[in-house]
Amino acid sequence: MAIVNKQGVVIGISNPVSISQLEYRLLELEEILIIIRAPVNKKLPAYPYDRKAKGSMTLGQFKKTRLSYILDLYEVAIIDGNYVEPHPAVLLSTLRGSYEH
């Protein structure tokens, strides 16, 4: 299954995974709680990244670059350590740190 961004560029190829597997992989690698609002039995391409995004990246940049292939299809909720959706301008380092208290 090809992973294509909004510009139509293939950014990866993978076997489809369940929504729960993808959410777990995102939490494991990115250390961010991401909930994909999709039918339970739906399959999506696996997350095409092997390295965690830099902490200096904003949440908005992260969504635009790393989650665009998911956001094109489904709504995504990103939850911080206070159980709210953070502003797109928050740094990933700040978001990751919010889970530690």
Image (tube, rainbow, N blue to C red):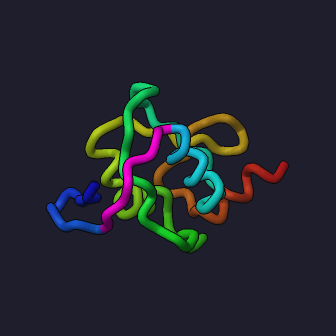
Q: Is residue 82 above or below residue 15?
A: above
Q: Residue furthest right?
A: 101
Assign the magenta stretch its main secondary structure: strand
Q: Nearer the viewer, residue 15 or 48?
A: 15
Tell me the magenta residue range: 12-19
* Image side of residue 76 versus residue 12, left or right: right
Q: What's the residue at 33%, 45% (across, down)?
A: 71
In the rendered image, the quadrant that contains the N terminus is bottom left
What residue sits 35% from the left and 58% below the top?
64
* Near-viewer residue (92 or 9): 9
Q: Quadrant of residue 93?
A: bottom right
Query: In the rendered image, is residue 56 in sight?
Result: no
Compared to 54, does 75 lie above or below?
above
Q: Foreground residue, 89 or 10?
A: 10
The quadrant in which residue 54 appears is bottom right
The residue closer to the viewer here, 45 or 64, is 45
List x then y, in percent, for residue 78. Answer: 54, 43
Q: Position of residue 52 (x, y in %)?
A: 57, 69
Q: Residue at x 75, y 49 (%)?
A: 99
Looking at the image, can residue 24 be seen?
A: yes
Query: Residue 85: percent from the left, percent from the top?
Result: 55, 39
Q: Is residue 18 magenta?
A: yes
Q: Residue at x 45, y 58 (%)?
A: 47
Tell me if 67 is positioned left or right of 32 in this view.
left
